Amino acid sequence: MGHDVSVFMLRIDALTKNYNRHGSPAVDSASFDVNDGEIVGFVGLNGAGKTTTIRVGCGVTLPTSGSVSIDGHDIVKEKAEASMYLGWVPEFPNFEQNARARDLMVYFAGYHGISKNDALKRTKDLFERVSLSGFEKKKLRTYSQGMKKRFSLAAALLPDPKNYMFDEILNGLDPEGIRFIRALMVDLKRRGKAVLLSSHILTEIENISDRVVFIHKGKIIKIATRDDLAKIESASSMLKVVIQNLNDDALGYLRTLGEVRVEGNTVWLSNFMVDPTQISTELVKRGFLIREFNLERSNLEEYFFKLVGASQNMLPDRSARN
Amino acid sequence: MAHPILYDIRKVLLSKTVLISMILLIGISFFLISSFSVSVTTTNSTNTQILSWYESSGTYHYLVFETNQYGQAVSGVTIQGNLSSSFFSQSTVPTYQGPTVTTNSSGEAQFTIKVPASDINEVNANYTVPVIIHEPNGDVYSAGGQPAIYSPFTTLPNGSSINVPVSPGQIVLVASSSLVGGFSGSITTVTDASNSEQEDLMVTWAGNNGSLPTSYSLYYAFFNETQTCTTGQIGGIGAVSCSSSFSQPSSLSESNTTFFANMTSYEQVFSPPKLEANLGNGSQIGFGLFSSNGFEVTPPVYYSISQLYPVAQTVSSSQAGSFVVSFLTTIYGYFIPLIAIVGSYNLYGKDRVSGVLESVLAQPVSRRGLALSRFFSTFAGMVIAIAISMGVVDALVLYYTKSLLNTMILVASAGAFFVELGAFIGIMMVLSRVIKSSGLLIGIGIGLFIIFDFLWSILILLVLAVSRVGINSAAYLGYQVAAEFLNPSQFVQLVITYLTSSSSIGLVSPAKYGITIPSLVVTGILWVVVPLAGFLYLAIKRD
């Protein structure tokens, strides 16, 4: 990558995790970074290695090799220091069932050196933010899965760390919850936090991520920036034009702009570099009667599956879990 | 800062496992101690009265002491004695009334009854002394429903004396050799006021004409047992049966005894003299009271050393103190591994296996720090719980027996319990790191408890049988003791064996089998440190 280490708030370097000595690694030499004020989407199929990467990243699982550093602190060698700067929301939050939510928040705060009074005040504020007001004194066994996710988010936000790892945080949330998370991400980015966000909901990743890390079968197969995504978008977009009086003149003009495929009166134009509005204006000027003019964009999902398809041929088959 | 370890300790203390265990321990203690104490202890309202007397010119002088079961003076007891004929049918024979007197702060009261000179011979021959005692709490003392009546006059030949064992609630009259200028006394035991398991020596004596016994001294000598052991078969299993014996001399002399104490008052309580080393369980100690001219004024009194030195010897099961020791070493000894196993499972193993612990591990804490924190909070929480329950048990013992537990037994047992606790917590935490199923984890834990607590002896017997180690061989007991070193749940037994020279398999010499303070300390440390080190290794290096 060639960057200065201090730039990266979250750095995953040649990370490998092998649960089974005789099986394929769940994560295989994965490397990527997340900078301050950056949201990095983490995308992959089930079992691709996203959750394992995040679990190793937040220190709850040990790596087989490689390293993860948080603000320059190794998550294995300097676990306490590294965790001081990291908030983690797991895919399936699991807390002490008989603990009261407020007590557990105070308990977690103790590890961060936050006083009880301060922790109680922060808990009140955070529970309001994550819509858990009134549930502070309830035992966590009475919480639904969605409420546990909100509680987990509140716990991650409690010490206001500089970095976050969110593992499928959008799962199990209602539309209002998803909107809240989206706003939260933007706010964290605005406040200069580094966020690694794994999700199956690729439209959300596409909308808010500065970069997207694609992982498949434990390997990082692509790291795309927003510019890369924009190019992918334009390169993969298709212009659908239905011309009532289609003839060779029209086709000749369109072939000068890009690749053309014809289905009756419908022309599919791809790999064009001209503004679509200029195309429609020119066709009308030339006397063609346009019945439909539609730009069909390629989304992240399609791109992801293209990547997976491509990598499928390159990577050896695996039977191991992630 | 709300320190997380305090939260963890509080969680341990308030966990159902620990609370139920404490309630069970205290409940069982209460039930057993209260029911047992009824039959072996006395209350303050039951006292011991000691009476001595002499006659001078037709005046009978009586000296009365009122003491409680600890030999402590009881004041305010009203006593009234008469001289009456033992021939009840002879109604014409007069009864000589004595005055009513009250014991002073020394528990002492004196009264006289004057008899006409013409009746002295008749009184000496046929009269008795009914004594009616009114205790401060309103009780009128009587034995067998009747006022206690003793007649030393008619039963004792001149020149002899008797010793009547003091027991709570019984009037004791110690007679003298002569009606004129007589003296009386006794040597007996009372319960130590500060330690219900300890017996003290109470000596009562009056000099000539009721004078203070300042010219009398107490001497003692130890008599070692002669032990004879035979071997045999019990239910197909070899057994060693030992008996001990020695002959009690009918009299002692100053030359073959050791000076112990001078008498300075009518009634004195002494702690027993220092125990000699290398005495068998059946050894005895004899006491003799000597006048200034070296004459033994009472027949010697013998006590087994297990009675006077309960810490050094196995206490008889008939004593309340031994019950408490047995209780601590058996009930607690059995309970603690179970508490440690179930408690560690609930407070660590279950969280670890279910993944709950990950939410804590994600906090700013090192793996070593979290592992140590969980180990010590579980340990500390349970130590506090057990200490509280032991404190309550001690308070129960105090309430029922008016005496606290023996400090050495209490401290040594507590230390052994904590080793046992630490060992089983460590073992369970090691298992928690390698077993992935909650059911399997608690199943294996309970299995270990059953093996260590109940099946260990059988396993050792089987191993020794397979190894063809003769049950009657000298090595047999050595292997048995070695097996106790290898079982954390029997560490308490090792400590008790060291303190009492007696194990569950018979009399042993602790040092001969390696049961010494250094070996116990090293074993205790290893039982805590080795499982803990294994747990730390797995917690830090394997995940």
Image: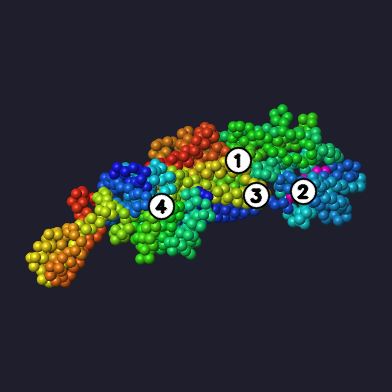
- The answer to which of marks 1 and 2 sits earlier in the sequence is 2
| Marked residue chain, label 3 | B
Q: Are marks 2 and 4 in contact (CB under 8 Å)?
A: no
B142 falls in the magenta region = no
Q: Is residue B308 above or below residue B389?
A: above
Q: Secondary structure at mark 1?
A: helix
Q: Earlier in the sequence, mark 2 or mark 3?
A: 2
Q: Nearer the viewer, mark 2 or mark 3?
A: 3
Q: Which residue is mark 1?
A: B408
**Chain label for disc 4:** A
Label 1 vs label 2, nearer the camera: 1
Q: What residue is pinned by disc 3? A: B398
Whether tag 3 and tag 4 are in contact, CB under 8 A, the answer is no
Q: Residue at x 27, y 52 (%)?
A: A224
**Magenta segment main secondary structure:** strand
Q: Check disc 4 and report the residue beneath it.
A: A87
Q: Is residue A13 left or right of residue B205?
A: left
Q: Could you say whether the residue bearing mark 2 is in a helix, strand or loop?
A: loop
Asked if the residue at tag 3 contacts the one at tag 2, i.e. Cβ–Cβ closer than 8 Å, the answer is no
**Distance of label 2 from label 4 (alpha carbons):** 73 Å
N-terminal of the pair, mark 1 or mark 3, is 3
* Residue nearest the observer in this picture, B339 or A19: A19
The magenta segment is B46-53
Judged left or right of residue B37, residue B83 is right
Residues under labels 4 and 1: Cα distance? 52 Å
